[in-house]
Image: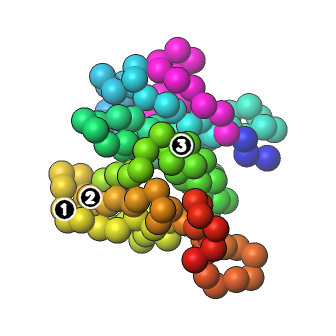
Amino acid sequence: MIVGEWINGEAGLEEALSVRASVFGAAGGRDENDAYAMHCVMSDSDTGAVVGTGRIRLSGAKFCIDRICVLPEYRGQYVGDLMTRLMLYRASQFAGEVRLVSPAEVAGFFARYGFAAEGEEEGGVAMRVLKEGIRFPSKCGRDEAQTLIGGEE
């Protein structure tokens, strides 16, 4: 089973940083934003291994989600989906808008949650979603998505 936990700041972040470095290489290392971020850390409860991570951080007056990654051997098992849902729920508790920059090839993944492209930015496609527009795509046989805040669409 995959479980998620939150780490605030840098203390206890070593395993998550190892996953980031494994997925992103040198670009995934520690940076100045880690100390001020809320980190979502996904672990395999059977092995205790950290298998994915992402963070929520304040950038200016905006909340941003970034550094989202899942180890290759855990992709396709909805780890990224669960982590994105957890991060959007947490961000929506503090902000009316959430932003991210997605690689172009995975922008469709974030669009399912209500993110809309706003243009290109270094590293990919700049996307944002307002709190009222955050969605959880349904996996229960319904084609339409449930909104996170405010009931059904």
Q: Is residue 87 visible?
A: no
**Which residue corresponds to mark 1?**
120
Tell me how far mark 1 sits from mark 3, CA to CA: 27 Å
Residue at the image point whose x is 24% and y is 52% from the top: 123
Q: Which region is colored magenta?
A: 4-24
**Upstream in the sequence, badge 1 or badge 3?**
3
Residue at the image point whose x is 78% and y is 37% from the top: 45
Q: Amino acid at mark 2?
A: Ala
Tell me how far mark 3 sits from mark 2, CA to CA: 22 Å
Image height of 131 relative to 142, above or below:
above
**Which residue corresponds to mark 3?**
93
Left or right: 13 with respect to 23? right
**Upstream in the sequence, badge 2 or badge 1?**
1
Mark 1 residue element: strand
Q: Is residue 22 magenta?
A: yes
Q: Position of residue 47 (x, y in %)?
A: 77, 35
Residue farthest to the top, as pictured: 11
Left or right: 33 with respect to 80? left
- The quarter of the picture where the C terminus appears is bottom right
Q: Position of residue 89 (x, y in %)?
A: 57, 49
Q: Is residue 81 visible?
A: yes
Tell me how far mark 2 sits from mark 1, CA to CA: 6 Å
Q: Is residue 126 magenta?
A: no
Image height of 121 relative to 36, above or below:
below
What scheme was used to colour the molecule?
A: rainbow
Q: Position of residue 151 (x, y in %)?
A: 64, 68
**Which residue corresponds to mark 2?**
126
Left or right: 17 with respect to 28? right
Q: Are marks 2 and 1 in contact (CB under 8 Å)?
A: yes
Residue at the image point whose x is 74% and y is 82% from the top: 141
Residue farthest to the front, as pictured: 150
